[in-house]
């Protein structure tokens, strides 16, 4: 990063830690668990990979945090490109890709002496983006793939009386896949039950990250002027990271007395009481914070900033870009049309238009049809395109998504659903959309197409064409950190370039990235970064102790 991205001294009001974690989703929670002194050991459980067993059996009394992860993960294959993520997944979920639901091959031992001081800064309650998703939806992954170390999801469900037999849940839910409400509660409870609450700073929004240096000034013997001790600050001085932002104090609309509690010993930093489903939250106060640490971890998710089409009218009120907004729009349509909490009367309502061919678009379609709202579905690819995500999902586990795919292909019909394949939105006006043909490999309209343009009357336009991480707190939004320099960071096309074993950014020492930022978009692999980062920090501490 350029020299104007650094500061000479950190602020006097800063609080200090050894590690600052930005983001409080599953990856960050797993990292906090390990940094809090929990150490993993191979417990001798059977694995299908004999070579891995042999490596793990060398010095079984030694924690994975002291072992050579390059050696242990050599030759492992799976659905992640990160070797440490594959290693951690094979030990937490042995042979999961073979359909086996085996117990973990790791035992965890807690040792306070190995605690590494750290803070986890999150915009919401622990769980990150999961806390913002509609609780009635089901996860893509199986129950066990959503779990974190040392707390099996299945056992948690049983202990909370949240099994399907005791819940009044619709029978259409697929066994083996959790509801989002379950996942939210699991992550919140995990932080509590594992004793991690003191590390978490909820409702903390990071706005700036910069390098700061500790410099000694000297006095020139002839002029008497105060001068820096050296000319090359970067080369001659170690740096820390200064992380600034603001913390919001929130209250539940249903209970205004339920506000963030002040955290003793943390100055003005306020913490939210994790009170579960307490109703809509309202911001009632805001103030700044500043932390300084030698290491910073980027653990933000990939869903903060929705992608846009870049067409005229996309900023109009009738256009939305997230499922949360779409859910609220359906509620508003229901109230406008029926005047009560019944379903919408579709003949009296213009359809909603959904753009995209991914799972978010499918979720929006399913939500609308469930409410009796007619849907026009615009997507740029052929419904038979092999790259569509639906072809990668087992039919028995994901029947609702395969129903959407059948509707797209015309193999199933509904009066509530109208597909418009190989089309794209060209312009949006108030409650009207101009649709035209698109090339299969681009969102842009096709100049060679002879198909006429079509204006469609709609009530809502839901543009569901993916999203990306919000890295606005970094210089140039972190573009210098990617595999492809100077291009925006994207969890699919331009991830942060990291060392595959330590997860340290190759272009920025002492900065780490994990989860979607390094291409691991599923929880079961995203938490692998916690092992890599903790292993590296443990080695750094040992070197400093020599």
Image (cartoon, grey):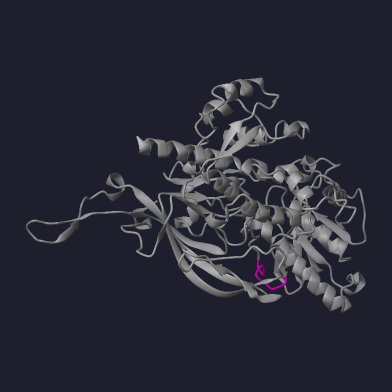
Side (left or right) of 542 relative to 86: left
Q: Nearer the viewer, residue 344 or 63?
A: 63
Q: Assess whether residue 313 is covered by the magenta stretch.
A: yes
Side (left or right) of 296 relative to 227: right
Question: From the viewer's perspective, is residue 279 above or below residue 161?
Answer: below
Give the residue at the far left of this rendering.
Answer: 222
Q: Residue, x 82% and y 61% (percent of image)? A: 367
Q: Residue, x 31% and y 57% (percent of image)? A: 8
- Quadrant of the rendered image containing residue 457: bottom right
Residue 141 visible to an observer of this rendering = no
Q: Nearer the viewer, residue 546 or 474?
A: 546
Residue 312 coordinates in the image, percent (x, y): 65, 68
Secondary structure mostly seen in magenta is loop
Residue 162 coordinates in the image, percent (x, y): 80, 53
Side (left or right) of 278 relative to 166: left
Residue 482 coordinates in the image, percent (x, y): 51, 46
Q: Assess whether residue 538 is covered by the magenta stretch.
A: no
- Quadrant of the rendered image containing residue 379: bottom right
Q: Magenta stretch: give its range.
A: 312-318
Number of marks in the image? 0
Q: Residue, x 62% and y 65% (percent of image)? A: 273
Q: Quadrant of the C terminus?
A: top left
Residue 96 coordinates in the image, percent (x, y): 73, 34
Question: From the viewer's perspective, is residue 214 above or below residue 270?
Answer: above
Residue 280 visible to an observer of this rendering = yes
Q: Residue, x 55% and y 69% (percent of image)? A: 248
């Amino acid at each position: 990063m350029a020299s104007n991205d650094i500061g000479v001294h950190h602020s006097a009001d800063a609080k200090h830690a050894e590690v600052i974690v930005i983001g409080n989703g599953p990856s960050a929670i797993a990292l906090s668990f390990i940094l809090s002194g929990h150490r993993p050991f191979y417990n001798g459980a059977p694995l299908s990979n004999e070579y891995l067993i042999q490596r793990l059996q060398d010095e079984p009394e030694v924690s994975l945090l002291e072992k050579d992860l390059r050696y242990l993960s050599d030759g492992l294959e799976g659905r992640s490109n990160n070797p440490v993520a594959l290693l951690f997944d094979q030990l937490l979920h042995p042979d999961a890709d073979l359909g086996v639901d085996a117990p973990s091959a790791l035992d965890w031992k807690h040792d306070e002496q190995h605690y590494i001081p750290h803070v986890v800064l999150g915009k919401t309650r622990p769980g990150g983006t999961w806390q913002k998703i509609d609780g009635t939806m089901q996860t893509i992954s199986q129950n066990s793939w959503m779990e974190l170390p040392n707390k099996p999801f299945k056992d948690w469900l049983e202990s909370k009386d949240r099994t399907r037999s005791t819940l009044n849940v619709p029978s259409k839910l697929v066994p083996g896949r959790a509801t989002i409400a379950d996942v939210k509660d699991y992550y919140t409870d995990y932080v509590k039950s594992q004793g991690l609450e003191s590390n978490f700073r909820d409702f903390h929004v990071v706005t700036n990250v910069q390098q700061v240096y500790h410099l000694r000034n000297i006095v020139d013997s002839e002029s008497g002027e105060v001068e820096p001790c050296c000319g090359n600050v970067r080369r001659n001085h170690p740096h820390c990271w200064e992380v600034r932002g603001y913390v919001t104090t929130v209250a539940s609309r249903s209970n205004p007395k339920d506000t963030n509690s002040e955290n003793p010993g943390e100055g003005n930093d306020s913490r939210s009481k994790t009170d579960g489903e307490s109703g809509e939250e309202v911001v009632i106060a805001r103030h700044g914070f500043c932390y300084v640490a030698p290491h910073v971890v980027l653990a933000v998710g990939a869903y903060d900033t929705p992608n846009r089409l870049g067409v005229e009218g996309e900023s109009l009120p009738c256009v939305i870009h997230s499922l949360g907004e779409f859910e609220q729009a359906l509620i508003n349509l229901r109230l406008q049309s029926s005047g009560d909490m019944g379903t919408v009367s579709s003949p009296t309502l213009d359809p909603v238009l959904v753009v995209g061919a991914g799972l978010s678009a499918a979720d929006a379609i399913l939500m609308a049809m469930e409410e009796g709202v007619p849907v026009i579905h615009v997507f740029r690819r052929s419904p038979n395109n092999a790259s569509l995500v639906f072809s990668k999902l087992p039919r028995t586990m994901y029947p609702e998504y395969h129903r959407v795919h059948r509707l797209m292909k015309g193999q199933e019909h509904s009066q509530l659903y109208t597909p418009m394949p190989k089309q794209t939105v060209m312009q949006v006006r108030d409650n009207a959309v101009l649709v035209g043909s698109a090339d299969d490999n681009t969102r842009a309209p096709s100049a060679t197409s002879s198909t006429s343009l079509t204006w469609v009357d709609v009530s809502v336009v839901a543009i569901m064409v993916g999203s990306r991480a919000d890295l606005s707190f970094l210089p140039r939004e972190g573009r210098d950190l990617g595999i492809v320099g100077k291009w925006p960071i994207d969890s699919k096309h331009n991830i942060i370039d990291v060392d595959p074993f330590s997860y340290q950014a190759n272009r920025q020492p002492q900065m780490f990235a994990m989860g979607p930022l390094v291409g691991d978009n599923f929880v079961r692999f995203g938490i692998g970064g916690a092992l890599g980062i903790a292993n590296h920090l443990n080695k750094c501490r040992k070197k400093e102790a020599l």
